[in-house]
Image (cartoon, rainbow, N blue to C red):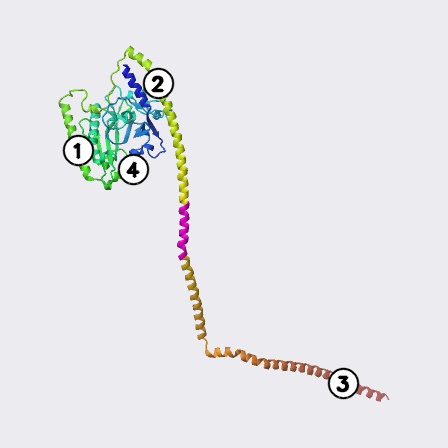
Amino acid sequence: MGPARWLALGSLLALGSLLEGRLVGEQDAGFGECDQFFYAGTPPAGLAAEGQVKICQRSEGTERFATLYSTRDRIPVYSAFRAPRPAPGGVEQRWLVEPQIDDPNSSFEEVIDEADAITSVNNLGSQQALNADYLDSDYQRGQLYPFSLSKDLHVATFTLTNAAPMTRSFQARWYVNLNSLMDRALTPQCGGGDDLYIITGAVPSDHKVKDKVTIPEFVWLAACCAVPGGGWAMGFVQHTRDGDVIEDVMVKDLEKLLPLNPQLFQNNCGETEQDTEKMRKILEVVNQVQDDERRAQAQESASPRSSPRSDKSALLPPEAPEERSSFLGTLLGFIATPFIKLFQLIYHLVAGILKGIMYVLWYVTKQVMHGIESGLCRLGSAIVSYFLVIGQELASIPWKVLKVIVKIIRAILRILCCVLKAICRLLGIPVRVLVDVATFPVYTMGAIPIVCKDIAMGLGGAISLLFDTAFGTMGGLFQVVFSVFKRIGYRVPFDNSGEL
């Protein structure tokens, strides 16, 4: 290994520190900051299952793409990204691992090189694929989000959580087809790709590499163009069998081919407003891509390739050059390693300090904005409540006046009703009764003397009767006494005369 190789490796180590892969918690509904890579900010519904982790892939502090990774199959279920086409550029292959998948308590919050993770991450390889799983096999690490479609640092796509086992020939066909579709159909028919959402996935088969990493039965791509008034949605499937060409399918049909029959795009990517003319043009390009793939397969089967690096292989991840050890290279590597580690440590410290400062500023700004927003909300709510109360009172005044008027009218009507009833009752009384009622006081006043006279006469008669009764009784008593004495007087003299 020459000095240039060690310097390149040192640069990649420094570059790797810029790349972060944040695991999104199971309690989160989506992919956090990476929801921007999904149409309407909504990940596919129905694909999530047990033994899966959500990864928001970042580099240089910016989100790059999202991946749903199956720890059971050790391949990605899908990767979602936006699809602007980059300018061509070279890249050196360097595959990275996610430490927190195997070790949730790991202090590493970013993807790292597998060689560095061996001594610092517990249970490395228990939940994710490693480079060693692909060695001495017929399969390559095929990226679901190919590096040739990345507009940012190409190393961002060189994570093993973005790779599935593919044969060399299938990998070449898959990358060629993706680039052809993007360049010739999908991007041109979606306003340059600014509103284009791409999801690429793999459906596992029953076969595995070294009984660890599941080989895909087929890979698929779903595209959603969200241009207002001119959007569309298309799906593509390519089986891993030799001789099969890429197939175009409707998104609904693609969903039926996938496990659990999910919904890839919310509202089917605005199904009611899709532009059929653009979809027709895309299908025409797909037919051309299929014809090109058939011709390429026929040429490959008819004659061997003239060079080990064809136009197709230019789109493949570059292979690392063969390492030739030498004493000088080993010595230079031994000397350069401490400086590289020191540089990386300094970078981590500076990045950590800057990150902490940014977090503090962000937190303070967030609190200030939250306070301002809360104050404005309260002020607005108070103003709205005040005007609502005033409006309700103003609106209730006519109603209250109307209620008072109605009550007055009802009272007047009741009085009139009572008067009419009284009149009706008076009119219903006979005239003779009215005359008697009218003359009753006169008769009453005239009868008072007579009644008094009668009362006096009655009293006088009663008194006279009492006197008559008393005198009569007294007279009767005197007569009785007189009669008694009279009888006694006559008898005494008679008796005395006899004695004489």
The residue singled out by tag 4 in the image is 40
Q: Are marks 2 and 1 in contact (CB under 8 Å)?
A: no
Which quarter of the rendered picture does the N terminus lie within?
Answer: top left
The residue singled out by tag 1 in the image is 285
Which residue is found at the position 70% from the left and 81% from the top?
470
The residue singled out by tag 2 in the image is 341
Query: Which SS class for mark 2?
Result: helix
Number of other residues with Cα within 10 Å of mark 2, as a class: few under 14, some 14 to 19, many 20 or more = some
Task: Give x and y (percent) for residue 301.
Answer: 14, 23
Task: Give x and y (percent) for residue 292.
Answer: 15, 29
Q: Which mark is residue 482?
A: 3
Look at the picture and state if 143 lies above or below 423: above
Look at the picture and state if 380 lies above or below 185: below
Q: Magenta segment, which residues?
A: 382-398
Kind of residue indicated by mark 2: Lys
Kind of residue indicated by mark 3: Phe
CA distance separating discs 1 and 3: 171 Å
Q: Earlier in the sequence, mark 4 or mark 1?
A: 4
Query: Which SS class for mark 1?
Result: helix
**In the picture provided, is 450 more to the left or to the right than 135?**
right
Kind of residue indicated by mark 4: Ala
In the picture as drawn, the residue positioned furthest to the left comes out as 302
Task: Give x and y (percent) for residue 265.
Answer: 27, 36
Which residue is found at the position 31% from the left and 14% from the top?
333
CA distance separating discs 3 and 4: 147 Å
